[in-house]
Image (spheres, rainbow, N blue to C red):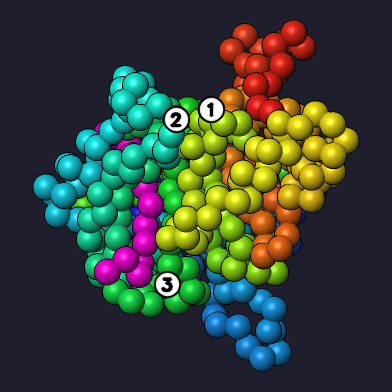
Amino acid sequence: MHASRRLQRRLAAALVAASLIAAGCTGAADDGASPTATSVPDAAAPTTAPPAATQDDAEADPRDAYFELDRVLDISIEIAVEDWDVLRNQTRTLADVFAEIEEYGLSRPFASIYTWFSATVTVDGETHAEVGVRKKGFVGSQSSTKPSLKLRFDKYVDDQSLLGGMNRMTLNNSVQDPSMLNTCLSYRVFAAAGNPAPRCNFATVSVNGTDLGLYVHVEEFKAPFLSHHFGSAEGHLYEGTVSDFTPEFRGTVEKKTHEDADDWSDIDAVVAALADPSDAGLKALSEIVDLDRFLSFWATEVLVGHWDGYAGDRNNYWFYRVPDGRFVFLPWGTDGTFHLSDDPNPFDNISNPPPSVL
């Protein structure tokens, strides 16, 4: 293995150990393996893809192996040079955001600016052609040299996936978190507090033979996640980006399921309930939002210092309700957590309360 790749994998092993220690664990990873450098698979001997579930293990999800905290994925992407140059240079600046607000106000979700490209992708020795690859990120994580990426194995080939059933991957560059610890650690804190949260581990990534370094691999809010945590993926999922449950900020909420249905009655119900300061308003709110779980979510955002989340910035959050159920909030974009005391943060002073309305 190339020396830099070996060093990255040793770094990932150290990050795993630090995550477990900081989260109050005794040193055992989720599968019971000790998070030492020797437990991290070497790229020269790729980890075997997880086997399919058997009848004797009906509840086992073969995707679980891709999120084991002490597993460092080795991902290689081969893509046309001209496509890569376009992909990595697509960007959004604060000026672009303000220009879009100037033109449309906050009446709609922010425009999707990224283009999918076809590439050949190898994950731990398993290769697939015609995999969709695009850049990701709003503003803060922008980079043309180490872009955050989304991979979609079934973008161009129906039902294509890794052998364990994984058909999507999110790879964050963590440029706002040099420690690379915040995302995985904060999601573990959310989960420990009883909040549904993405799983997270690490991956080394190369493009056309060029080593891009270590990435944070984060679980997406797709059907497997929703089914696991809520028992159904048929509900209503939304993403909030500069969004809130007020007439002013409601328009930027983005549908992530049932996108073709022009039905916003559940969002409107939250907005209406919050506009009613009476006991009737609180009762109506409790019928559409699981308030106990929301308070846990809110408290955990404050605990980990998620200044760019819902409580602090009306940003970086998702929320979901099963059919005829109540909304549950989901954390996202936690690379800026555990900030230093001299960083700007709405939680620093009690006189500067969070702006979100719930």
Is residue 74 in the magenta section?
A: no
Q: Which residue is mark 3?
A: 162
Q: What is the CA distance from the residue labelled 1 to the residue labelled 2?
A: 7 Å
The residue at 42%/39% (across/down) is 109
Q: Position of residue 309 (x, y in %)?
A: 60, 32
Among numbered discs 2 and 3, the one appearing first in the sequence:
2
Viewer-proximal residue, 344 or 53? 344
Q: Position of residue 110 (x, y in %)?
A: 39, 37
* Predominant secondary structure, magenta span: loop
Q: Position of residue 22 (x, y in %)?
A: 73, 36
Q: Which residue is mark 2?
A: 106
Could you tell me the amino acid type at mark 1? Glu
Viewer-proximal residue, 344 or 262? 262
Q: Are marks 2 and 3 in contact (CB under 8 Å)?
A: no
Could you tell me the amino acid type at mark 3? Leu
The residue most toward the right is 279
- Callout 1: 10 Å neighbours few (<14), some, many (20+)? few
Query: What mark, if any, has residue 248 been given in the picture?
Result: 1
Among numbered discs 3 and 1, the one appearing first in the sequence:
3
Question: Is residue 145 toward the left or the right of residue 40 in the image?
Answer: left
Is residue 154 in the magenta section?
A: yes
Residue 189, image quadrant = top right
Q: Position of residue 249 (x, y in %)?
A: 53, 30
The residue at 45%/76% (across/down) is 163
For discs 3 and 1, the disc positioned in front in the rendered view: 1
